[in-house]
Image (cartoon, rainbow, N blue to C red):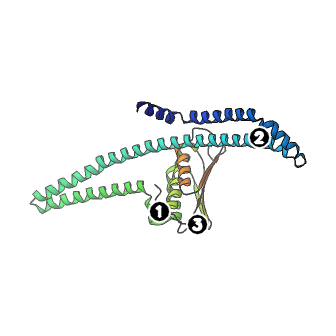
Amino acid sequence: MRAVLRLSRSRACFPGRWDLAWVLGATVLTFVLSSAFEVRERLAAILDHAEAWQVDEIPLTLLALALGLAWYAMRRRQEAARLLAQNRELAQKLIALQDSERLALARELHDEFGQHCTAIRIEATYIQRSSSLEQIGEAARRASASAERLQDGVRRLVRRLRPAELDQLGLVAAMQSLCEAWTTRSGVPCVFQARGDLRERGEAVDTTIYRVTQEALANVVRHANATRVQIELAATSQHLSLSVEDDGHGFTVASPKRGFGLLGATERAAALGGSFEAESAPGAGTRIRMCLPVGQPVRAEAA
């Protein structure tokens, strides 16, 4: 039983060794059989009779095809390895971001919400024990103020989990409001343009567009040092495209150290069957473009 477990572990840890052993074994067996039956000589004699149809060129053609397929398989393996490394990096950053967000939420719930709840309980106890109407009124006003601050905190948390502007204003108005608010905070002019019919595109599509725009604007503030930003949202019957362009410092797109924002935007677009690309160069500004298919409105939630 122990020998079987050891063998299975070896296969699990080194699956390529067994594949290589099969390939080498098949090669040696082919050589032995070819030598025993003189396959090459017999094949040459047969192909000599078909010279008029150039059949004798088939083996060389097949060799070129085999080499081409081997090169193609190697390229696909390299691409798969790159995508796997990118997915691992994204998963690690997502886990770290989730832990950070959960810690921030827990701290806010404990420090702020707990404080307001305790204050309301104290005022309620004070009201129960008070006999003066004036004291009861003062305690009720303090409790009301604590409840109002608690409600504001809840709304703030809800906005962090899902953009409330999308539900209240719709995608176009929410994007315009986001652009204006960002201009007020950063002092950098932000121009928003919308083209096409942008109604009934689905909650997941709207949320993805809004979140990617938020991340793009945040990157402009952190890294670009731009003097203007232009956002364009265009819709056709089949696609919805988002473009965010700035005239900032730019960056090297091919750099292996891509930010979490770019990886996250790529995954958001891929989850909806779309595409995401970034065009930039040092000193030449940055332009990101996301294209999403919206022929069938998607109702699944995109966090």
Residue 118 or 68: which is nearer the viewer? 68
The residue mark sitting in front, 2 or 3, is 2
Q: What percent of the width, then of the height, locates residue 302?
A: 47, 56
Mark 1: few/some/many CA within 10 Å (<14, 14-19, 20+): some
N-terminal of the two: label 2 or label 3?
2
Q: What percent of the width, then of the height, locates residue 277?
A: 62, 50
The answer to whether 218 is drawn above or below residue 197 in the figure is above
- Left or right: 153, with 271 as reference point: left
Q: Write down the residue under mark 3.
A: 295
The answer to whether 91 is drawn above or below residue 126 in the figure is above
Residue 244 visible? The answer is: no
Q: How many marks?
A: 3
Q: Write down the residue under mark 2.
A: 63
Residue 174 visible? The answer is: yes
Mark drawn on residue 166: 1
The residue mark sitting in front, 3 or 1, is 3
Mark 2: few/some/many CA within 10 Å (<14, 14-19, 20+): few
